[in-house]
Amino acid sequence: MNMRAKPACGIRWFRRGWRKAFRSELADAYEARADMNLTSPLCFWQQATLLRIMAASAALDFTQAVHETVDCDREGNVHFAFGYPAGTAAQPAALRDISVGIWLPDPERESLENAMLQRGVLLAVSRAVGSPNDPAKAQPVFQTTDVKVPHEAFVFQMAKLMYEESELFGSERMDRPNRQATMCGEAREALRSLPPNDDTQDFAEQIDKTLKQLGGK
């Protein structure tokens, strides 16, 4: 039996969560260069804070989506009811302006955010279909009208993404160790639902180490 994504645990929810990555990356760029801009450093700090708040909300949605997907049909497939995402894996040129402390006009900032959003979704979708480091390889997968990924492979990749993005709540960003631990714990639980192999065991050890550093919170 194949699993058709339900609204509560399906691809629609994942797509919202996938947008978190671009906001977190963009927030890092604004924060890193706030001290370089002598005329409007507060604007950089405020933008970084706003982006992280939105990223945090999306991260929790993503965590819930992974949690509910683990409980879906483990013998089936996850179906993607959309085509290959627009955008490119390359960083937008405007990001370089932010990185050197240039405050962009409103239209250019909006354009940058849209480009980063597309990039974030593209990279996440590529990972979901088994091409985490090469979106170009993911594109042929979407030439069929019924794109599907084995449940186990999908959950493994989403658990890895959830673990990586839990760093949003780390001490160098939002400093919310309980939330970071929650995301790491959910990633660990997702792994327990999968047949053990070298990849899952290595990843489980990595998560356990992080949870230990967080004090098991």
Image (cartoon, rainbow, N blue to C red):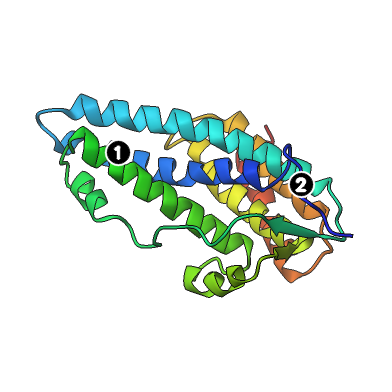
Split into 4 quadrants, where in the image is the C terminus? top right
The residue wearing badge 2 is: 69
Tell me the CA gap for discs 1 and 2: 32 Å
**Residue 215, can we see it?**
no
Secondary structure at numbered mark 2 = helix
Q: Secondary structure at mark 1?
A: helix
Give the amino acid at mark 2. Answer: Thr
The residue at 55%/65% (across/down) is 132
Please tell me whether residue 19 is drawn above or below residue 124 in the rendered image. Answer: above
Residue 39 vertical placement versus 193 (above, below): above
Q: Amino acid at mark 1?
A: Glu
Q: Residue at x 82, y 54 (%)?
A: 3
Q: Are marks 1 and 2 in contact (CB under 8 Å)?
A: no
Viewer-side label of 1, 2: 1
Count up the numbered dots: 2
Outermost residue toward the front in this view = 145
Q: Say left or right for 132 vs 49.
A: right
Q: Position of residue 76 (x, y in %)?
A: 84, 60
Determine whether 52 is above or below 97 in the image.
above
Q: Which residue is mark 1?
A: 110
Q: Residue at x 34, y 32 (%)?
A: 48
Q: Quadrant of the N terminus?
A: bottom right
Residue 214 position, x and y percent, is 61, 37
Label 2 neighbourhood size at 10 Å, few (<14), some (14-19), many (20+)?
many
Q: Please name whichever residue, 11 or 183, is drawn nearer the observer in this view of the structure.
A: 11
Instruction: Report crowding for label 1: few under 14, some 14 to 19, many 20 or more residues within 10 A (C-alpha).
Output: few
Decide which of tag 1 and tag 2 comes sooner along the chain: 2
